[in-house]
Image: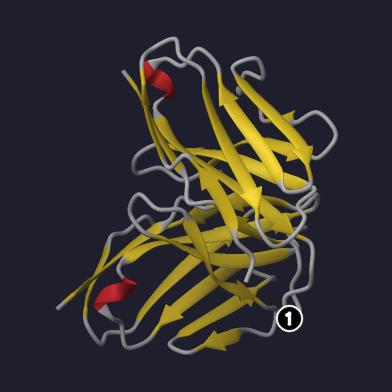
Amino acid sequence: GAVVSQHPSWVICKSGTSVKIECRSLDFQATTMFWYRQFPKQSLMLMATSNEGSKATYEQGVEKDKFLINHASLTLSTLTVTSAHPEDSSFYICSARDFRWQGIVKNIQYFGAGTRLSVL
Amino acid sequence: RKEVEQDPGPFNVPEGATVAFNCTYSNSASQSFFWYRQDCRKEPKLLMSVYSSGNEDGRFTAQLNRASQYISLLIRDSKLSDSATYLCVVNNAGNMLTFGGGTRLMVKP
């Protein structure tokens, strides 16, 4: 089945550090990937849609200069949290959309394992 | 009103019980529907897609009612390993997934 790899799984960093998270689709090409953030006991909140070869589309309230997204190839999107602060500590999850038919359904999104970011 | 609403629970049930979750969505143009399962501190994993005619996968049955705009998930013969948060997910025009807040299930011995 489709697999999405996300790396690193856990980051602890000092305030002011920039952190880069990678998301790769391993056995399919993903022209569209998504970045979510999840705070404890809350649901996933979409941060941005990452489009291969073009600029990301950010959700309202998400600072594009703070969360830099690069989708340079059909299998890789990166999220860089610039100058991270303690309030950026969260669980960041990427997903990739598989456009292939899976039975009678297509466009299923598969998730990476997530990155737990702790900013001290 | 939230786009996708779920009862957060928790639902505490004994092993072997049957439990049902409902989810309502507000966008009548929504195109496809899914149930995902999320374990604590893990990523969501696709449990099953929800088809218009309803579908079953082992102990799990999903139903869709477009007229009333709700989706249900039925779990029969609950196992301890079914304990998780179940996320109702709606795919709208533009292929954007919208997540419900999740329903937490605790299966007790």
Q: Quadrant of the C terminus of chain A?
A: top left
| Residue count near mark 1 (Cα–Cα under 10 Å), binned few <14, some 14–19, many ≥20 | few
The amino acid type found where label 1 is placed reads: Gly
Residue A117 as seen in the image, left or right of residue A51: left
The location of residue A83, given as percent across then percent down, is: 50, 12
Residue located 67% across and 78% down the image = B51
The location of residue B104, given as percent across then percent down, is: 33, 60
Q: Is B56 placed above or below B51 here?
A: below
The location of residue A41, given as percent across then percent down, is: 34, 44
| Label 1 element class | loop
Residue B25 as seen in the image, left or right of residue B83: right
Q: Is residue B69 visible?
A: no
Residue placed furthest toward the left:
B109
Of residues A47 and A52, which is closer to you in this image? A52
Chain letter belonging to callout 1: A
Residue located 70% across and 79% down the image = B52
Q: State the scheme by which the image is colored.
A: secondary structure
Residue located 78% across and 41% down the image = A73
Q: Is residue B87 visible?
A: yes
Q: Is B102 placed above or below A66 here?
A: below
Dividing the picture into quarters, in which one does residue B80 lie?
bottom left
Of residues A70 and B1, which is closer to you in this image? A70
Q: Is A20 placed above or below A120 here?
A: below
Residue placed furthest toward the right:
A53
Q: Quadrant of the N terminus of chain A?
A: bottom right
| Residue behind mark 1 | A103
Q: How many marks?
A: 1
